[in-house]
Amino acid sequence: MNNVNLASFFIPSDLHKDITEKHENQLRAPPPGLRLPERLHVYRELYPLDDGTGPALGLAGLTTYAYRATSERDGSRFCLRRVEGFRLTSQEPLSAIDRWKRLKHPNIVPIAEAFSTRAFNDSSLILSYAYYPNSHTLANLHSPNPLNPSPPPLSEKQMWTYLLQIVSALMYVHNQGLAVRCLHPSRILVSSKNRIRLNCLGALDILAYDDFANVNLQQQEDLVSVGTLLLSLALGNSKAVTSNPTKAIEYFSRQYGPDLQRIVLWLLGNRSPLKTAEELWSMITKINPGIVAEVIDSSLTANDRLDNELSKEVENGRLVRLLCKFNFINERAEFDFDPRWSETGDRYIIKLFRDYVFHQVDENGKPVLDMSHVLVCLNKLDAGVDESIMLISRDEQSCLVVSYKEVKQCVESAFR
Amino acid sequence: MNNVNLASFFIPSDLHKDITEKHENQLRAPPPGLRLPERLHVYRELYPLDDGTGPALGLAGLTTYAYRATSERDGSRFCLRRVEGFRLTSQEPLSAIDRWKRLKHPNIVPIAEAFSTRAFNDSSLILSYAYYPNSHTLANLHSPNPLNPSPPPLSEKQMWTYLLQIVSALMYVHNQGLAVRCLHPSRILVSSKNRIRLNCLGALDILAYDDFANVNLQQQEDLVSVGTLLLSLALGNSKAVTSNPTKAIEYFSRQYGPDLQRIVLWLLGNRSPLKTAEELWSMITKINPGIVAEVIDSSLTANDRLDNELSKEVENGRLVRLLCKFNFINERAEFDFDPRWSETGDRYIIKLFRDYVFHQVDENGKPVLDMSHVLVCLNKLDAGVDESIMLISRDEQSCLVVSYKEVKQCVESAFR
């Protein structure tokens, strides 16, 4: 992996633009006339997320719809997945979700809760998942569809990176004694650049509830599904894989190297003895230790980039508060005759300091607009450093030598 | 790894406090009387980083000192490593640094440049590295010293995590045809929580410059050094390892499992056939695929946490610029008699808007300090929305109805 890739593998090149788009996306109001419920359990402001480019995909043979919604509990956003026409016969299936609610892993979409509702004028099941703005399903990205008619084929490296993340999630889920049961390109999100998240977890434990379900068997099926998934991603088409698996494997072998082939054949091959996700993981790290190093390096590099951006913005946050304090204090009309504004008072110092920071002039008396001077001064003020500066009165008749520390004390005492 | 560990493995629990401490640390002025040079090449504001708790560690038998410094080029900070009493006999050794300058990896400290100087009244070599505030060396953290007299022993998991990162960096450096040559607890930084960075890279390529150096041999020595390093970390003492390696290995075997032992023995064992860092990496991922999964999961989880924090903070930068514009414009003494400040001019509107945003009073005429009012107003101004507000003159005799969009135009025209 060259440096450019390493730096931007998990982070978009224009991070701020990406975040702003996500913000704006979340503020968008739904098109009028949809007749969605105004309120659903604790959720409001429903906004449809299905792009309508294909038939809505089913779960256990039932049609599902996705909505973004805002929780009244804390104002945060969720993705509500509605399963149309599903009638709960008992509350027991819902309790299956309690185990899923405890799961936390960077490659799964966590579930918040499940409930049934009549708000859509039918009997619907609602599953509330974490919401990832601007995310796409693997199907959206890698299968031809009206919005993306000829997606480029998945590179070997991307295939490995997806596989690594899917297996990591699978290993975690299986270790919790659960099974994913819906490993399909339309049920896996890419929530940010190259980041995989298994979606719709737990849904089938309600929709196809079975008291006597054999989790071991379901886990074996998960592993077979990983094999089918890799073929589907290679072909950009799930149906072609199920209708002619042999041809799909042939196609796969022409596009990808022998290591990936070996993994697919192992996944789709003889089911005894039982396979485990951990075995699969060991196989991957053994066959391709290089991709493991690349994923770790890219991810740590992404951490550095985010950390760096965050520390800049946190500094800005403190500057915003500081600048607001100045503006709260200075030139308040109602204090025009307040004695604390006398030529020796704290607030006078703040005013002169404001002039020092913002109202510099050059030798011809023209304003100097120097943001770096402003930021240096404000940062020193915020830190309360010992360094002294000379403040000059507006009539240039008097001057005061004060330290940033003293100015900081003045600002603080003005807010007491 | 349980969820709590996963979430905070690479990120401190109080992220904002950590960032603020790093920020303040960078602004701290040096104690007076040190007689450090005011200016060194393009660097200013030198601040000593050695904590003085032990003898300054040498490189190639020479004493070194570390200083934080600010570059005049862009105001960013660097760690200058000064090698005392080193005299360059030709410029050729300095060119060795050109290759190191191109290196970028999340587990190394990048080098910016190297130069010689007489600013310390001797002949010193200066190596300028990236600066990581609040970082510690592995020696600081895991060997007894006055500031940390009895450090807790390194857990098996932490040992693996360190090893994984060190080997990842080693593999990268070796692939570039270079060798680290100073893998020692005092030459490896922990730059943020559990994050390893190899430090002082390239220094020995100048200090112990050799036209005919055998890089392959140096790389073999790097691998032996990894083995010694693991023993040193386990014992909290590098000297005990070199004085009695057999006893050190015995101690190690009692503290850590057979997998880590196997790796140490391989590293310290027979040198033929030649070993490679890639072999070591494959060995680690094969022996302990679980730790690989944990490191990937922790790192991706850290990305999520940072991304989430960043999306909350990303607006701050825009608000700072906006607030500074206000302060650049308002109450400039030199414009007291400028006609554009008349009661109908653009700048008058800006002044009244400032009063509207910051100088709200309650029914008793007491100041209202409402940050949320301020932020809402500023964000609307920044977006230039059509919403209108009523601005009232200070004498309450006149009022103006303007939209945020119009105020925005006033601010922009003031800067033309």
Image (spheres, coloured by chain):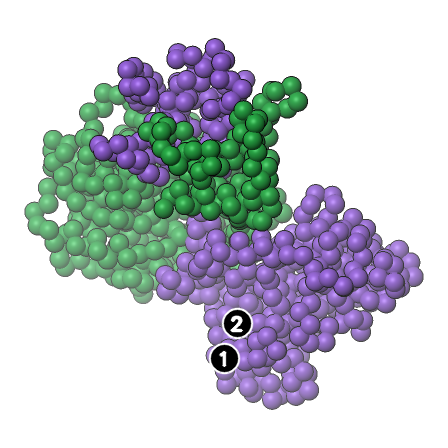
Chain colours: A purple, B green
The chain identifier of the residue carrying mark 2 reads A
Of B385 and B165, nearer the camera is B385
- Position of residue A171 measured from the top left corner of the image (x, y, whole percent): 63, 61
Residue drawn at point x = 39 percent, y = 37 percent? B340
- Position of residue A392 measured from the top left corner of the image (x, y, whole percent): 30, 20
Q: Which amino acid does label 2 sit on?
A: Met
| Residue A343 image-quadrant placement | top left
Label 1 neighbourhood size at 10 Å, few (<14), some (14-19), many (20+)?
A: some
The chain identifier of the residue carrying mark 1 reads A
Q: In this view, does A413 lie to the left or right of A88?
A: left
Residue drawn at point x = 23 percent, y = 20 percent? B33
Q: Which amino acid does label 1 sit on?
A: Tyr
Of B37 and A350, nearer the camera is A350
Q: In this view, does A348 lie to the left or right of B9?
A: left
Residue drawn at point x = 14 percent, y = 59 percent? B212
- Position of residue B274 measured from the top left corner of the image (x, y, whole percent): 31, 64
Of A135 and B257, nearer the camera is A135
What is the secondary structure assignment of the residue under circle 1?
Answer: loop
Label 2 neighbourhood size at 10 Å, few (<14), some (14-19), many (20+)?
A: some
- Position of residue A145 measured from the top left corner of the image (x, y, whole percent): 61, 78
Q: In which quarter of the image is the N terminus of chain A?
A: bottom left
Say if mark 1 contacts mark 2, CB within 8 Å: yes
- Residue that badge 2 annotates: A159
